[in-house]
Structures are given as C-alpha cells and as structure tokens.
Image (spheres, rainbow, N blue to C red):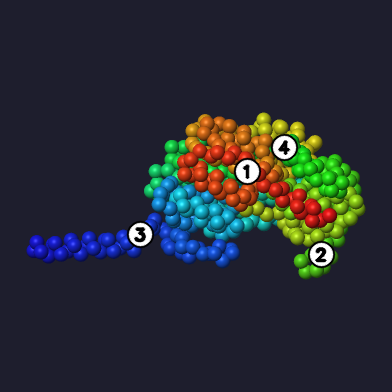
Amino acid sequence: MYYKILVLLIFTAVNYVVNANENIGLFKNEKAILFTANDGQQTDAYEGYIMVPENRNKANSRDIRVNYVRFPATGKFKGSPIIYLSGGPGGSGIGTAKWRRFPLFMALREHADVIALDQRGTGASEKMPYCVSDYAIGLTEAVPINQVEQRYRIAAAECVSKWTKQGADVLGYTTVQNAWDLNDLRLHFKAPKVTLWGISYGSHLALAAISLFEEHIDKVVIASAEGMDQTVKLPVNTSAYFKRVQQEINQHPELLAVYGDIVGRMQRVHQQLAHKPIKLTLKDKDGSPMPFLFQKRHMQFLASRVISDPSEFLALLLSTYRDIEGGSYQSITTILERGMFNNEKIGFRMMSMAMDVASGITDARLEKVRQQKEDSLLGDLLNFPMPHLNKLVEGLDLGDNFRQPKPAEVSMLLLTGTLDGRTYIEGQKKAVAHLSNVTQVKVVNAGHNLFMSSPEVLSTMQQFLRGEKVETLTISIKAEFIEHLKQSL
C-alpha cells in the first residue's frame, strides 16, 4: 500500500513539473504568438488579456476585456514590467509596437518584460463601434466656429445616447478608471511594481496612476508631457511655438528671403479667409468634381493637425500659407483632396471623446483659453473638440480634485522636444512640477513624437532604467522641416 502511494505521489509530481514546463512564462489568459511588425520583423511574444470592471464606481458594472502583447525580457536582470501607454487618447499600444517604435520595444526587453497595452476601449481591447451622428457640416456651408461647436455638442450627445443603448457605460471611460486598469495589470503579472512608459496622453495617464498608487510604480519614462489640467493647451503657447519655428528659419538667409515673417503671413491669410473664403473645386474619391468653400476655420484646423512634429508636414504648411497669400491654390487643393474635410456626418470614438471630456479643464484655465484664443494664431482649435465638449455628459467630468496634482517622489525621466507643436515646452515642466525626482532631457529641434528622433534618446532611456544618473540633459538634432523647405526652393 505504501509503495502504491509513493508511486502515485511521484507520478503526480512529475506530471505537475511537465505541465508547469509546458506553460513556463505564461500568465492567465495568455498564449504564445509570433509577433510581426509592419516592416516584416518578427519575434516571439505572448498575447493576453485581463477582465476589468467597466465602471468601478458602479456596483453591478459589467466587465470588459483589455488586451495586451507581452514581449518577455531578454536581459540577465529582470526588472519591473514596463507598460507602454499610448497617446491620443485612443492610440493602440499593440499598433505602436508594430509601427516604427518596434525597435524600442525590442531594445527595452533588456531591462524587463515590455507590455504593449491597448487601453480600455482601444485597439484589440473590447470597444464600442465608431458612432456616426445625424449631423454634418457641408463643405460649401459658411459656418462660423461657434455654430460648428454647437453641432459637435449635439452630435456628441447623440452618440453618447447610442452607446448607452448599446450597453456601454460611458461614465467608465475616464483616466482614473484607465489608471486602475494598470494596477489590475500589475496584479495580473504578480509584480510588486510596474514601470510606466508613455507619451502625450500616455503621460497624462501615467501622472494619474502616480497620484493613485505611487507605491506600486517603480520608474516612469514619459515624453511630450500632458499635465493633469493640460488636456486643453493654452493658445498663447501656440504663438510662442511659431516664434521658435521663425527662429530656425532666421538662421538660413535663403529661407528667410522666401518665407519672411511666417506669423505675419499666417495672420494675413486668416484675415483674408475670414473676409472672403476661397471657392475651390476638388476631386472626389470617384473623380467627380466636389465644391469646397475654404474658410478661416479650415485653415486653422488644418494647421493645428500638422504642427505636432517639425517634419515635412510643417514645411508643407508654411509653403501653403505662402501660396495662398500669393493667390495660388494648388497646394491647398492637393492637401484637401487627401480627405481631412468631407461631407460625411460628424462621428466619434467613445474612448477618445470620453477620456478628454472626463479629464476636462478647470474654470480658471478655461477662462485663460477664452481670453487668449482671439489673439492666437489657431484660436482654441488645437485640441478640438475640447474644450468645446466640456462637461457634455453629466457625471463624467472628474472634477478639480483630479486636475490638482499631488506631490510624489517616484523616479521619472521626462523627454521634451523643443519644437513640439502639441504639448508645448512651456507646459511640460509645469506638468511635472509637483514631482521631486524628475530628470528632464531636452531634445533640441525634436517634436511631439520624439522617441525615434535620435539614438541618444534610447541610450538615455536605458541609462535611466538601469538606475544610473543621466548625465546628458540636452540632445540636439537637425530641424527636419528646414531641410524640406530648402528642397522646395
């Protein structure tokens, strides 16, 4: 009898070891995959998900699925899992890993598992369908910006109603709920702490997580910081940005001779369009003629969408302003035919809209925006449709307590591009002013998406993650838009 029991115990132990080895490195709800980047590069990874409450403030909330891809650590020392937080809000972490940042994800595996996260309501995670409202703004309508705002608010309210009828709880799509998902992910990985790596809205999310559970955060690496009350950027900083662009142009006499005072030209073109919009005829997708009444708001909106990075798009924008003032409309026609504006009805993605509305804006900052927008080059369109949808949904706004940063000591690396046209340099230092252990590295002439702007950025991140003191606080690169302007001469 004793012999049979001993054999049974040995068999059970061996069977346990075999099964454990078969699932080595796997967490719950994970499976091994061959991850393929957009350029064809491949690597072994794990695809997984967690289930989280859609709204933790509601006792009977449904659970929703949040997906991720985990790239296992390759180095000898395995630190806290590094969770990538996309910008937007609404960006896909998994999509980013497939895109041009694939080398970064692979390089950081030297330090720990790297997690490409699709935040709640994005990418491969469970999400509501894109909502198309019953409202549109026709391409030939002469509509002032205040009426555009009114239509967007009506359209957004309609979409909130549609999502609610489809079973979603819109009140669950806030940065606080999003941050608690990160802690649930930490528990899922059985990790005492996690390291957060984010950009733009991802930095906003990281800052919220620090306020909620700093004790479970090891290190933080962010770029293009967006503070707790910086969902809406100050219009005055847009003007300061174009002055920095002008300073770069001034260093090149041949460009200065052609482009001159860019701020003055932008103001003149806006006045021209406000007084007399341009009647254009575009080619529709099927090749048929499509009339377009090009107005000041179109020009401002277009500019606000292309100034994030000092790239060929910024160069094209400056050339387009020059052409319009000179009476040539070919460049703007070519741009518009790419489809930025159309006759389609106004639509929204739930996560993107709700997150911004929830993070909101304090009354004091909103008053600043209102005072500054009249004299600003782009008005308050940089973050459209915020603040235009401010407090649209009752109960969604997180309140000023959320927007008031709380002191913390977590170790942070902040990477700031001096030509960032979305999260301006003036605001980034303020965004982390409440933190006592921040190393800020300026990347001169870099824009919003600066992670791949220089090999020194990666080496700085790795130095920081190793726990070493970051010695180089300034990284310099060429202003890309300058080279494009020269090529166009």
Which amino acid does the dot numbered 3 rest on?
A: Ile
Residue 427: horizontal and vertical position, in percent?
65, 36
SS label for mark 2 = strand
Distance in Å between CA atoms under marks 3 and 1: 41 Å
Residue 464: horizontal and vertical position, in percent?
51, 42
User: Residues at badges 4 and 2 in contact (C-beta under 8 Å)?
Assistant: no
Mark 3 / mark 4, whichever is N-terminal: 3
Tag on residue 475? 1
User: Residues at badges 1 and 4 in contact (C-beta under 8 Å)?
Assistant: no
Distance in Å between CA atoms under marks 3 and 4: 51 Å
Horizontal side of 35 relative to 270 (left or right) equals: left
Rate crowding at label 2 as few (under 14), some (14 to 19) or many (20 or more) other CA atoms within 10 Å.
Answer: some
Residue at position x 84%, y 65% in the image: 289
Q: Kindly identify which residue carries mark 2.
A: 283
Of circles 1 and 4, the one toward us is: 1
SS label for mark 3 = loop
Q: Where the N terminus falls, by quadrant?
A: bottom left
Q: Is residue 433 above or below residue 49?
A: above
Q: Kindly identify which residue carries mark 4.
A: 237
In which quarter of the view is residue 16 placed? Answer: bottom left
Q: Which of 346 and 200 is in front in this view?
A: 200
